[in-house]
Image (cartoon, grey):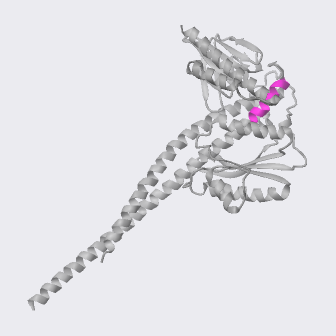
Amino acid sequence: MTSQIQCLIVTPEKTVVDQRADFAALPLYDGELGVAPGHTPMIGRLGSGELRIRAAEGTRRFYVEGGFVEVLDNVVTVLTSRALPAEEINPDVVAEQLRAARSRPARSDEEFAERDRLAAQYRAQARVARRAQQAAR
Amino acid sequence: MAKARTLDKRRKAIRNIHKITRTMELISRANFSRAMARAVSATAYTKRITALVGHLARSGLNVTHPLMQPHEPVRSGVLLVLTSNRGLCGGYNAAVFRLAASRWNAMVEEMPGPCLEVVGKRGISAFRFRGVQPRQSFTHFNDKPAFAEVEVLANRYQEEYLAGRLDRLEIAYTRFESLSRQVAVVETLLPLGALVSEEVGGNDANHGASPAAYEFFPSPEAILEEVVPTSFKIKLFKCFLDAAVSEQIARMTAMKAATENAEAMIEALTMTYNRARQGQITSEMLEVLGGAEALNE
């Protein structure tokens, strides 16, 4: 049994991460899931939130938005439509976007749902950025 | 005989054209390698999604989804045509347009509510020339279509399809097969075709491991619910990428041919120019000699 996992994050536009790691924490649709070496094969749905990859050279943090994860033979494959490195998220910009999203007029149920979804995404982004800053300190 | 002057002028003009076409060739070559890299990464994503669906299917799940159910009868269909914003790319736009126009005519006869949507200025003006008004047209997709932009389109189609306002989505674009082969095709994106077909057989051969070893969060059905729309989006995105790659290749080839033509023309003109100049000198000399001889007598 190897003591490391292979981490892959793939978006439609490019492969964001392909590295070996000791541990990965994934934002599933209903909460966080940790994957250590020797994890049982699984397929899960992702929500939006923070993805952490812990390796010998340090922890990398990403914001991912939806998608899937597949764990098989110590290979963790994350398929997501968006993966942003946490350092690249600007909290001020996100706060502004959140404000704009929340002040969007919503008249129908779908518009309300859309607004809530957007707001939740921006909040998750802000959270990821904040945690990255705390970790850096 | 002022012919030498005009020949020289023409030669200069062609030299300028030569410079321009060569630069355009170089630019599209650079764009091409970038577009190609993007297409390759998208393929990586597609492959993994297909593998995932394969695993789902092997866990004994029946792969069906509202997006895969054909609507009968087909009342309203959308034909999405992908062309480029800029010209000077050989037969690229013409090939797509020819196919799209004939498909469009067939659609008008087949169903009561066909809709035309066109991407790219070239296609828009070609359809306008034919007197067909597209329902929607887009010019903001450049040579690097972003997934977020395509996703907006995909979401709209998906919504319309699920709501029953759309019964069929077809797309006319140039499929990239290899560096030397790109074909204009019309494909049906909705209803979504089989997601696994050939993949399942290949996977079983690769690792005949116990098929139901996966754990699913929350459940295979819920994941399938999400996977199918995602693979629709990625399919649409792939079409855009293929079109972008093919456009660059078409432009590269066209500009290469233009550059070579200009070179040949410059060579031919230089020859004619030299001859004309020599002729001019000779006739001038003859005039001087003739004059001198007349004086001598």
Image position, residue B97 (x, y; %): 67, 56
Task: Judge from the rendering whether residue A135 lies leftward or rightward of residue B186; answer left or right.
Answer: left
Q: Is residue A37 above or below residue B42?
A: above
x, y percentage for residue A56? 56, 10
Q: Of B146 and B70, which appears nearest the observer? A: B146
Residue that protrudes farthest toward the bottom in the picture: B297
**Residue B170: x and y, percent?**
76, 48
Q: At which x and y percent is residue B122?
A: 62, 54
Decide which of B291, A95 is in the foreground and name it: A95
- Is residue A35 shown to the viewer in this render? yes
Asked whether, in this view, residue A90 is left or right of residue B54, the answer is left
Residue A39, can we see it? no
Residue sitting farthest toward the right? B72
Vertically, is A79 above or below B124? above
Pick the front one: A93 or B171: A93
Magenta-highlighted stretch: main secondary structure?
helix
- Asked which quadrant contains residue A39, the reply is top right
Residue B108: quadrant of the picture: bottom right
- Give, as a single range, the part of the protein colored magenta: B220-232
Residue name at image x 63 percent, y 41 percent: B241
Q: Is B93 one of the magenta-colored residues?
A: no
Q: Residue at x 70, y 25 (%)?
A: A103
Quadrant position of the N terminus of chain B in the picture: bottom left
As drawn, B285 above or below A122? below
Residue under the point 19% across and 79% down = B285
Q: Is residue A43 left or right of residue B293?
A: right
